Image (cartoon, rainbow, N blue to C red):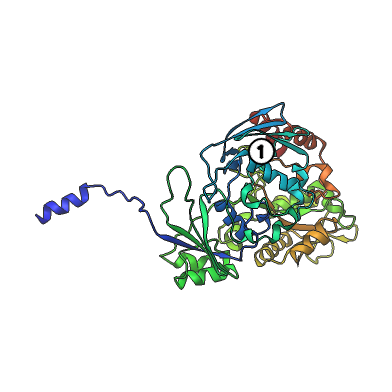
Amino acid sequence: LASLLGYSTYSVTTVLVPAHGGVFREGVAGNPRFLNPLLCEANEVDQDLCALIYRGLTKINKQGRVVPDLALDWTITDEKVYTFRLREDQFWHDGQRVTADDVLFTVGILQDPNVIGLPDLTLLWRTVSVEKLDDFTVRFTLSEPYTPFLDYTAIGLLPRHIYAGVPAAELASSALNTNPIGAGPMAVEQAAADHIRLKPHPFASGASPYISALEFHFYPDHPSLLAAFIADEIDGISAVLPEDMPLAEQRKDLQLLSTVQAAYLSVVFNLTNPNTPFLQDKLVRQALYYALDRNKLIEETLAGQGVIANSPFLPENWAYFSDVRPYEHNVFKAAQLLDAAGWVDSNGDGVRDKDGRPLQFLLHTNDDPLQEALVARLAEDWQRVGVRAVPTPVTFAGLVNDLLVPRKFDAALVTWETPGDPDPYPLWHSSQAAGGGANYAGWHNEEADEIMEKARAITNEEERKKLYWRFQE
């Protein structure tokens, strides 16, 4: 009998299936400020919560494509008229149906001249006309073709019947920011100073979530999260910092999951600064690139939590060019390029010079400990080829307002968020090199300008892909 039972345990396959019920407690660093989809972009905790509480007409998948969400589908006419059909079986958390009136109401807030703190969003939406064709159909008309417009339709909608009494100027101070009503998969059940509890949308169509509730517990910083997990206060951690990875990896009760963020880090060289004219020399910039050992930087400074970026387009994005030229670590080639550019160490002090000028510059970043560690490592790599980069951390506000925007910097390590449409125009087009644009480097390439202008004015993905492949080259 024992022999037969033993045989049966090996011959019968066991399939694990999820069970309904349970509460998952996740720890996050920081506190929510605005649980409002129009105001959440400046705070990571707000972003996480708004993604669960609200939904837009569309959403963006990991390939950067816009796909339907509250909308059933849409059509595009003349490259600038977008007609959306809404699903008729979608409801707000209080049971009211989502209709075209909610779309018009949300856009109306974005277009209101009294709304505070939404300059990037309002700038676009005030150039768009919107009209209701019926209870579940809306039409947007752009003043000119602009393909990345679809990204903006992913912004979460607000329920008209809840927010209609809140003036646009008072949106940020509304009590609804702490007790919101949305149409997302999770609804607010309880909000307290130290945590928020979400429950499944009570009026959602389709299959309900397995989980009974999801709690976000708020902690002052990321190191506190691992300590809270060890103390069994939470079940999951939103992020583990590189310095905490060794301790996290030792725990058998913690499963570590990694994903690629929709962002990349880049050293921006100021090509217009008269104090660093050598950065205008392509040979010098290429030498600086070859001198970096990015594999070792990722392994040692980021504890393996990083992927080398060979392009400003994410590897998972539909427009990524896999054959783009890579710059592998090559100290010998870096030295050759600097020699060819006329930079040699004439006085033996370890720093190359030319015409009596040392090859050195300030390398700025914000005062985040991880950013500081990164620029220190970059400086070490460049010192090995005779280039002196002086790590210079400042506050985030100081980096942006005092250095990047007025173009008063030599070089800076900057993080660029690149979700959704791969349109590189805001960061790379020459028109963005002055004023309020984000082409802080002052990079100018006429062919690239032409590519970016054409690609953002057409909707055919294959045509855009060919243009962006050439842009990456």
Residue 378 screen position, x and y as percent: 70, 60
Q: Is residue 280 visible?
A: yes
- Give the residue type at disc 1: Leu
Asked whether 374 or 435 is in front, the reply is 435
In the image, farthest residue toward the left:
1
Q: Residue furthest top?
A: 78
Dot 1 surroundings within 10 Å: few (below 14), some, or many (20 or more)? some
Residue 306 appearing in the image: no
- Residue 146 image-quadrant placement: top right
- Find numbered disc 1 in the image and state the secondary structure of the residue it sits on: helix
Asked if residue 18 lies left or right of residue 373, the reply is: left
- Camera-side residue: 163 or 154? 163
x, y percent for residue 16 = 32, 51
In the depicted view, which residue is nearer to us: 61 or 376? 61
Q: Quadrant of the C terminus?
A: top right
Residue 328, placed above or below residue 466: below
Q: How many marks?
A: 1
Q: Nearer the viewer, residue 133 or 288?
A: 133
Q: Residue 86: percent from the left, percent from the top?
A: 58, 36
On the image, numbered disc 1 is attached to which residue?
Answer: 150
- The residue sitting at 60% across, 69% down in the picture is 221
Q: Is residue 386 above or below residue 160?
A: below
Residue 305 image point, x, y percent: 56, 57
Q: Is residue 444 above or below residue 237?
A: above
Q: Is residue 330 left or right of residue 212?
A: right
The N terminus lies in quadrant:
bottom left
